[in-house]
Amino acid sequence: MSTQSFDYVIVGGGTAGLVTASRLSEDPNVTVAVVEAGGDVAHWPDTLIPGFFTKNLTKPEIDWTFFSTPQTNVNNRSIYLPRGKGLGGSSVLNFMTLGRASKSEYDAMESLGGSGWNWSNYLKYFRKSETFSADPASAAKHAFKPDPEAYGTEGPLHRILPSWISEHHMPYYEAMKSLGVSHQYDSSNGNCAGTGTGTGAIDPKTATRSSSVSAYYEPVKDRPNLTAIKLAQVTKVLFSKGSSGKLVATGVEYVQDAITKTVEAKKEVIVSAGTYQTPQLLELSGIGDPKILQAHDIPVLQDLPGVGANCQDHLSTAFVAEMNPEYESMDVLANDPVRAGAEWQLYETKKEGIFSAVSSIAYAFLPTKFFADVEAIKKAAEDPTIDREADGLAGMTKTIRLEKEWLSHDEVPQLEIVQVPAFVPTAGHVPEPGKRYFSIFMALMHPLARGTVHISSADPLKPPAIDGSFLDNKVDRALLVSALRFSRKVIKTEVLKDYLLKEVIPGEKMQSDEELEEYIKNTVATVFHPVGTASMFPQEEGGVVDSKCTVYGTENLRVIDASIIPVQIGAHIQATVYALAERAADIIKGVL
């Protein structure tokens, strides 16, 4: 295969990569190539059908199946970290949730050095990316009153309210209300604090997943100026020296069928490999912390110590109660073949029922004051070791201090607490056959832990070393203990007393903070929302990219994916990545 040449070469055909490719190829005068390590997986039934949303996890054709290094503060466990592989990336592997964080969080990205990356501009591109559908009957069922200014009506990605809800969906909201948590009739307009139904990336006509493949790639894949090179893992960005003294990206090397090949870029190379593989590729290409590169005998082309630093993810654990069998849960799909068959028939014929939606749609996003002692948490946050000042990355330290301020913010959520009408898989625990369960999934939105992602070898086909530093501080641990105690209050509310029989996980015998903390160490996982490893900060503060997504020290290498988000947000990140890529594409095209 002779070397091919394109104006733009995009590394990674995932959520952000396909958005960028679709938008750049709108100009018929430029050529665009997407180089993707995986293949075509977006049409697998287990990918398309919403109710099968967990079935592809750990399948190597569609999941990179990363694991963290053993984590000291979670009893030396290695944590499973799935990432999408194949066209569509994580948008064909994830749980389809489309949410937005608070206005304050997006504005914070601009204050940290990302000029123009604020709520107002994000909202513009949220709207551009989506077509939101909600008929009045569905909206009423969900106690949902959409702000018409907050939603897109002509974008590629479908976004809907779920067509199915459990019978204890609304009682859960009532239970939360009895504990002082108000209902949020629309959580997409800059204030997400409170209860509310989650929206999903699902096509309302077909009741199938809407992904970056179906929304952005398939409608335009026949453009003569757009090429997808599949089953091709990029191993290195190639550079020359420009007249300005900066690096000029001239193309990439990739491995396909065990053969190393190259593709040239006449204008730009755009890395959209994701929070774990973007820093890996930068380091393999000679960009990063000299200490890391020299340890693997990689020549240092650009000294950027922030590459691979500042890694953040949401941290989760679960609370499970046994449900009164008079009420229904999704456990019937495993326990009752006849009912499962009826549900499947309903989905096939009417595109309705349990299989038409994901299970976790009754959300609440809580600022600290609703579930924990704010003053006690703030006191714990005074520990100076949390700020990581010794790392010499001022931008990262700023994000930690910002998150400390958010601990007492009334609109920035610290906890996602979701009612799931089923047994939530929890490390070390399995459901009893025939029983029904009511679970509360808890996720810490702004952990103060900061991890790293670096190359583990000079071999580009080896996975990166991912060290999340999970639960490395007492604030994160205390918040999750408080979340468990709050979950106990939820299930004991008057409105839920008929639904639930007893606590199953962690179990009523666990009462002390020490016992609950040990349970958390044994069960904590991530929510698969990693950000931050190529953060948008000023270079002198440890930044990797500027506000135009250009890698410092280069003329034409950009990063467009979740790795540039400098501080974690109080929402599932998928919608934000779509908007990020939409705006970045406009920056490249000169629209902004």
Image: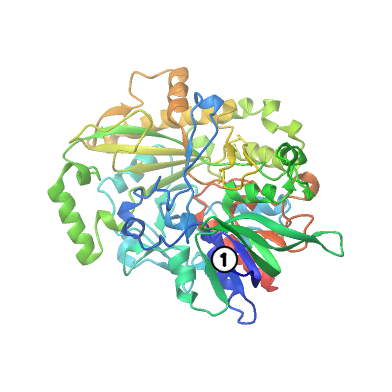
Per the image, label 1 sits on a secondary structure element best described as strand
Q: Is 2 left, or right, of 219 in this rendering? A: right
Residue type at the position of mark 1: Val
Name the residue nearer the viewer: 47 or 442.
47
Give residue 502's quadrant in the image.
top left
Name the residue nearer the viewer: 399 or 281.
281
Q: Is 228 left, or right, of 341 in this rendering? A: right
Please report the residue visible at 39 percent of the width from the left and 34 percent of the height from the top.
318
Tell me if residue 318 comes above or below residue 574 in the rendering: above
Please report the residue visible at 27 percent of the width from the left and 45 percent of the height from the top.
168
Tell me if residue 10 comes above or below residue 455 in the rendering: below
Residue 218, horizontal then vertical, whole percent? 45, 72
Tell me the residue that label 1 is attached to.
34
Label 1: few (<14), some (14–19) or many (≥20) C-alpha neighbours in 10 Å? many
Tell me if residue 558 comes above or below residue 57 in the rendering: below
Residue 163, horizontal then vertical, whole percent? 30, 60
Residue 439, horizontal then vertical, whole percent? 33, 37
